[in-house]
Image (cartoon, helix red, strand yellow):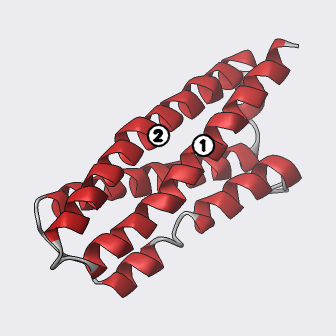
Amino acid sequence: MLYSWLKAFHIIGFVAWFAGLFYIFRLYVYHVENRDKPEITQLLATMERRLFRGICWPAMIFTATFGIALFVQMPGFYMAQGWFHAKLLGLLLLVGYHLYCGKVRKDLAAGRYNLTSRQCRLLNEVPLVPLFLIVIMVVVKPHFGG
């Protein structure tokens, strides 16, 4: 029963984390497109900060906490599964993207526009890669090796 509760909370955190990560670059698109309107960019910077600090970080920590709690229930089982290692690769990609989102947020807040609107739109799609990888690994659990 504990395992099911841990898994449920892990999934809830995962959904919240992805919601934040999918929305943050959408805000960056608007920020870049309105760079000449300080009243708009100031509002967007506030929204970006609140989203990143108030949703993305807590959701990532929540997800990690319950993911670790799941792992310690059966570490030998998980470490023996190829799909779990692939899931961890997806997680590493996702954490890297999360940290990059934070860097971009700080750059925009400081008035540094290193990305175009188009680049922000493309970067907004990046979380789809780890999303597909993680969900397929966890649900399908493909067998790797002989």
Residue type highlighted by circle 1: Ala
- Secondary structure beneath label 1: helix
Q: CA distance from mark 2 to mark 1?
A: 7 Å
Disc ID at residue 16: 1
Residue occupying image coordinates x 66% and y 45%: 15
* Crowd band around label 2 with a 10 angstrom C-alpha radius: few (<14), some (14–19), many (20+): some
Proximity of marks 2 and 1: CB atoms separated by less than 8 Å: yes
Nearer-the-camera pick, 61 or 40: 40
Residue occupying image coordinates x 30% and y 47%: 49
Query: In terms of sequence position, does the residue under pointer 2 or pointer 1 come before the other?
Result: 1
- Horizontally, residue 143 falls left or right of residue 124, namely right
Res 79 visible: no
Q: Note whether 73 is above or below 112 in the view shown.
A: above
- Horizontally, residue 74 falls left or right of residue 28, namely right
The location of residue 22, given as percent across then percent down, is: 53, 61
**Which quarter of the rendered picture does the C terminus lie within?**
bottom right
Q: Which residue is mark 2?
A: 55
The location of residue 77, given as percent across then percent down, is: 78, 28
